[in-house]
């Protein structure tokens, strides 16, 4: 009797450089559980493919002709809420980082990422987590403005354990890593993350991580 297999994660690569798409496809297709279902050289092509193709993850460059990668990410979040976008780019300046994160990207990675780390990031984002390159977190922390008192009060509404989880989210830790460090189950961590999002009125883990980075100095 054959075992039930898990469907592969379906990936769409969006980059205007053919060699980059070729290299990404070549690597991804060597990884079990990952499948490239299409390529696009522009945001318009991405949106056109999403009308007919079943896609789980879009690897999105920011410097696309026409509609930018950030704007395409915002459109995808509105029209295709089940599709998650990972920004994969060479830009690290705040003019690119902040709009991309605010557009709803679930991940922001630099093109110097190691192939194995990229595969892990794809799986993590597909599982509902968010992945930010450490340099991106530093860039966000440098450019965000000072805390407003009302937002500081929101931080103070978190329990001690919720605060501990939020602090680890800002370091890019995944649920299993947080669970191991705090000696609790992954289900408990998921509950804490859900409570954090509710109390801080945030949409997802990426926003929680950014909130934590912004107000890190106000955490005990």
Image: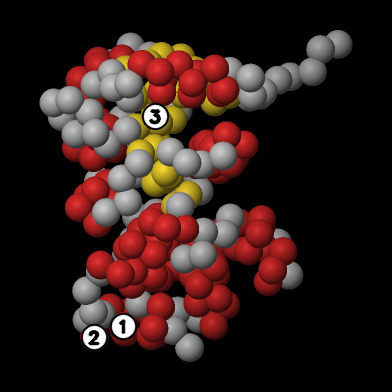
Helix, strand or loop for disc 3? strand
Q: Which residue is mark 3?
A: 58
Q: How many marks?
A: 3
- The quadrant the N terminus occupies is top right
How far across and how far down the image is residue 32, in percent? 67, 23
Nearest to N terminus: mark 3 or mark 1? 3
Instruction: Assess whether mark 2 and mark 1 are in contact (beta carbons under 8 angstroms).
Output: yes
Question: Residue 60, can we see it?
Answer: yes
Q: Secondary structure at mark 2?
A: helix
Q: Nearer the viewer, residue 206 or 69?
A: 69
Which disc is residue 149 wearing? Answer: 2
Callout 1 crowding tier (Cα within 10 Å): few <14, some 14–19, many ≥20: few
Q: Residue furthest right?
A: 1
Q: In percent of the image, x 25 and y 69: which residue is there?
A: 144
The local crowd at label 3, few if under 14, some if 14 to 19, many if 20 or more residues have their Cα within 10 Å, is many
62 sits left or right of 55 in the view: left
Using the image as rendered, state which of residue 81 and residue 177 is in the foreground: 177
Residue 151 on image: x %, y %: 28, 78
Tag 1 secondary structure: helix
**Image coords of residue 36 (percent x, y):** 49, 17
Instruction: Give how far apart the Cα atoms at labels 1 and 2 are.
Output: 5 Å
Residues at marks 3 and 1, CA–CA distance in whole angstroms = 34 Å
Image quadrant in which you'd find residue 67: top left
């Amino acid at each position: 009797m054959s075992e039930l297999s898990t469907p592969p994660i379906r990936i769409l690569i969006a980059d205007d450089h053919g060699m980059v798409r070729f290299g990404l496809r070549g690597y991804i297709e060597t990884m079990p559980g990952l499948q490239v279902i299409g390529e696009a050289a522009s945001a318009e092509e991405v949106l056109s493919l999403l009308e007919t193709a079943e896609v789980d993850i879009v690897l999105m460059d920011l410097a696309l002709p026409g509609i930018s990668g950030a704007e395409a990410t915002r459109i995808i979040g509105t029209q295709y809420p089940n599709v998650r976008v990972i920004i994969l780019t060479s830009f690290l300046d705040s003019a690119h980082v902040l709009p991309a994160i605010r557009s709803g990207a679930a991940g922001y990675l630099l093109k110097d990422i190691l192939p194995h780390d990229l595969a892990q990031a794809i799986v993590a984002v597909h599982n509902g987590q968010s992945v930010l390159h450490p340099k991106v977190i530093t860039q966000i922390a440098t450019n965000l403005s000072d805390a407003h008192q009302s937002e500081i009060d929101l931080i103070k509404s978190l329990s001690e354990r919720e605060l501990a989880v939020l602090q680890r989210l800002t370091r890019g830790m995944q649920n299993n890593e947080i669970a191991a460090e705090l000696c609790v189950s992954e289900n408990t961590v998921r509950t804490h993350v859900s409570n954090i999002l509710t109390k801080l009125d945030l949409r997802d883990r990426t926003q929680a991580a950014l909130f934590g980075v912004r107000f890190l100095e106000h955490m005990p």
